[in-house]
Image (tube, helix red, strand yellow):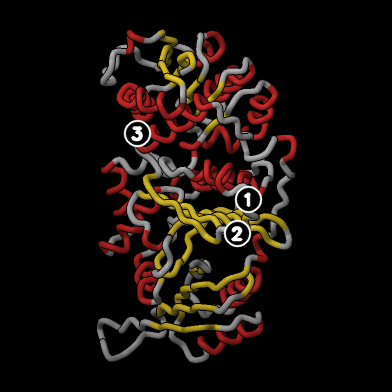
Amino acid sequence: MGEALKVGIAGLGTVGASVVQLLAKHGEQIARKSGRSLTVTAVSARDQSKDRGFDVSAFDWFTDPVELAKTADIDIYVELIGGDNGAAEDSVRAALSRGVHVVTANKALLARHGVDLAMIAEANNACLNYEAAVAGGIPIVKALRESMSGNDISRVYGILNGTCNYILTRMEADGISFEDCLADAQRLGYAEADPTFDIEGNDTAHKLAILTSLAFGTKISSDDIYMEGITSITTADIQAANELGFRIKLLGVAQRTETGIEQRVHPTMVPKTSAIARIDGVLNAVAVDGDYVGEIVLAGPGAGGNATASSVVADIADVARGDETPVLGMPAVDLKDYQRARMRLHEGGYYIRLSVFDRPGAFAEIARCMGEAGISLESIVQKRHANLEAPAQFDADVPQPVILITYETTEVAIKEALDVIMSKGVVAEQPQMIRIEKLN
């Protein structure tokens, strides 16, 4: 067994503390499997006096993580600070520049600077591992970088944010509103005090950008992702999806098209029979379509101290084993420029919820607009709301919910048809549109 590798850890929050404890608990087992023992020798955090469940005095203490990365006697630098710039970026650049291997769980850093950091790592014969940055404890990065290298990948998609999946699961199971589910998620610690980054799709987009690069050999392009969050999803949408044989999930989808690579994050109706539909609560799942292997689905915890620490330590063990996989699956200099497919050409079925005034000719006008746009309707469902003062009657001024399911069509056709319908004055509010994804 070779000489012990010295590890420095910046960030001793929930994940960092779990990494230290995991290495202490399973150190001998990891050493047997990797051929090298691992020793944490240096750490950095804001508060040295905080009780973390272990004695920090056993390690060299650095107040500044950049100083740790620049000067500490370490072989591996573990960055668990977070953020796409500042100390996280500076410390990772410093470590890689002097040939120190880096392990990080920082999706935002990689989404913004991943290609540049890969260049620095490869120029200095250093590893840059980041399994924990995408889907927590799920080994999807290793699957794409190594296990599926013999496949031509056509699509990668998944549930990449546990907060959103928890909210949508609770809305369906308990029939409660988005706002109530969000408040509950915050109370339980599944959502941040400011949940915008999660519920608007940004977190999913960062992870998807990394997966896209690994799947298609392109430079990371997190600014070229079509993005919608889940704030517009109502209990009516959840109920309608259930009755129609679907569930609603926030998906990140990247796929190869004739016009380039399409990256999109949005609420999606998925068939109840699909594997992805059965992923509930805070769990994550990622599916990959390969030409030889077909579809594989990996599911598991997407966050949490222990699950994330498991992936961090697996990356550390890979370094100890001597694995030197290119950071983004191929040498960074060989990555292709990202060519964005036009989202408005996306093809698929659509769920549309309209709030229609119950007046003569309203339905005919809607059908005409759809027909003129070349859109065929698979089903139409109307649930009429009676006048409460005269239950046997219906009020023409009270809009009625109408649900349309289309056959496969283009996004440009749907949006143009809905714009025309809005201009006719037959609907009371902006239509709700949710894409239906073809899944196994």
> Mark 2 or mark 3, which is nearer the start of the sequence?
2
The label on residue 305 is: 3
The label on residue 150 is: 1
In which quadrant of the rendered view does residue 71 lie? top right
Return the x and y of residue 137 as percentages of the image width and height.
41, 41
Q: Residues within 10 Å of mark 3 (few under 14, many from 20)?
A: some
Q: Residues within 10 Å of mark 2 (few under 14, many from 20)?
A: few
Kindly state the secondary structure of the residue where label 3 is placed: helix
Return the x and y of residue 336 as percentages of the image width and height.
74, 44
Q: Residues within 10 Å of mark 1 (few under 14, many from 20)?
A: few
> Mark 1 or mark 3, which is nearer the start of the sequence?
1
> Mark 2 or mark 1, which is nearer the start of the sequence?
1
Return the x and y of residue 65 as percentages of the image width and height.
49, 16
Q: Is residue 55 left or right of residue 71?
A: left
129 to 428, vertically: above or below = above
140 vs 195, nearest the viewer:
140
Q: Amino acid at mark 2?
A: Tyr
The label on residue 204 is: none
Q: Amino acid at mark 3?
A: Gly
Query: Circles 3 and 2: CB distance less than 8 Å?
Result: no
Q: Which one is closest to the eye, mark 3 or mark 1?
A: 1
Kindly state the secondary structure of the residue where label 1 is placed: loop
* Residue depicted at 61% across the width and 80% down the height: 375
Q: Amino acid at mark 1?
A: Gly
- Circle 2 sits on which residue? 292
Query: Circles 1 and 2: CB distance less than 8 Å?
Result: yes
* Residue depicted at 69% across the width and 29% down the height: 119
